[in-house]
Image (cartoon, rainbow, N blue to C red):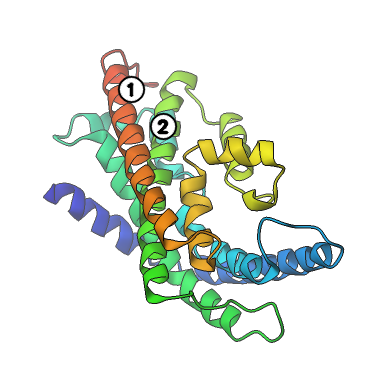
């Protein structure tokens, strides 16, 4: 376990060095959030939107922007390249579990990127005038539950991304599949349209998939769209899905390693 923690710390410290990228990300998240809020305000004025009240939706959007780095679907280019060019062989000869190395690297880089971006976005969004500002949580219990589900959501997203890495061993390239992967997770995770505003059929489909537990659930809890009692039930569901995804990924990777062919070696 110590070696994976050490790898986590190393990747975390490396990710913290990209301050220029973080500043660009903050500006992108801020202006994208403003644009979305103004669009949805126009829709609500015309009677659209019934899954959330406008105040909840505004906070929901700001939180998604603030914690985007933590729960997004972006994959690690180094890991993808190492599989495609055969450099993953160097990891395979080490006395480590490849699945947990990927897990540590992906989750640590997400936490570091989030640490650099979330606080500025939250501070600015909280002091905005009018009805476009980020509101505080309903209670301390709501905030604690939000934090728990947010970090469990990050681990769920990381385990989903690990499945994508494993899939590269079959396709031998991430070109094309990356775009499809991003599009599917963005849609079913409520990135294009908040899930609560989708038609009932699509809501049902999205909520059956684990992606919503990472990209939608924590923010609905924070805004009060999901109460604490219901949120606690979802925590159990998060643990179940996380266990399923981790076990599935570990089994698939172990199976692939028995017949793996390294490109270039």
Residue 111 position, x and y percent, is 38, 60
- The correct choice, above or below, for 214 with respect to 68 in the image is above
Give how far across and how far down residue 146 sits, in percent. Answer: 42, 63
Is 134 left, or right, of 139 in this rendering? right
For the residues labelled 1 and 2, the Cα–Cα distance comes to: 8 Å
Q: Residue at x 68, y 41 (%)?
A: 200
The numbered disc on residue 20 is none
Density class for disc 1 (Cα within 10 Å; few <14, some 14-19, many ≥20) is: some
Q: Residue at x 42, y 62 (%)?
A: 228
State the residue in front, 74 or 23. 74
Question: Residue drawn 66% across and 38% down?
Answer: 202
The image position of residue 79, as x and y in percent, is 39, 39
Residues marked 1 and 2 touching at CB (< 8 Å): yes
Of 95 and 229, nearer the camera is 229
Question: In the rendered image, which quarter contains the C terminus?
Answer: top left
Q: Which residue is mark 2?
A: 163
* Residue 91 falls left or right of residue 86: left
| Residue 127, x across and y down, in percent | 60, 86
Label 2 CA crowd tier, 10 Å (few <14, some 14–19, many 20+)? some
Res. 252 mark: 1
């Amino acid at each position: 376990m110590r070696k994976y923690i050490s790898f986590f710390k190393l990747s975390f410290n490396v990710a913290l060095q990209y301050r220029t990228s973080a500043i660009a990300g903050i500006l992108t998240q801020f202006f994208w959030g403003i644009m979305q809020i103004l669009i949805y305000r126009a829709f609500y004025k015309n009677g659209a939107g019934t899954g959330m009240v406008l105040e909840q939706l505004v906070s929901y959007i700001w939180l998604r922007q603030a914690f985007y780095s933590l729960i997004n679907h972006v994959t690690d280019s180094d890991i993808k390249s190492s599989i495609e060019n055969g450099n993953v062989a160097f990891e395979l000869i080490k006395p480590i579990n490849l699945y947990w190395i990927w897990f540590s690297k992906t989750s640590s880089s997400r936490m570091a990127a989030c640490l650099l971006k979330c606080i500025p976005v939250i501070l600015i969004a909280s002091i905005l005038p009018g009805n476009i500002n980020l509101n505080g949580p309903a209670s301390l219990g709501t905030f604690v539950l939000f934090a728990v589900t947010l970090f469990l959501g990050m681990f769920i997203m990381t385990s989903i991304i690990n499945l994508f890495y494993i899939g590269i061993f079959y396709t031998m390239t991430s070109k094309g599949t990356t775009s499809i992967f991003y599009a599917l997770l963005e849609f079913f995770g409520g990135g294009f349209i908040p899930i609560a505003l989708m038609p009932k059929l699509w809501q049902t489909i999205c909520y059956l998939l684990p992606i919503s537990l990472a990209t939608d659930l924590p923010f609905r809890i924070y805004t009060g769209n999901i109460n604490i009692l219901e949120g606690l039930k979802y925590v159990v569901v998060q643990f179940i899905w996380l266990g399923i995804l981790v076990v599935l990924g570990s089994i698939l990777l172990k199976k692939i390693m028995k017949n793996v062919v390294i490109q270039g070696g």
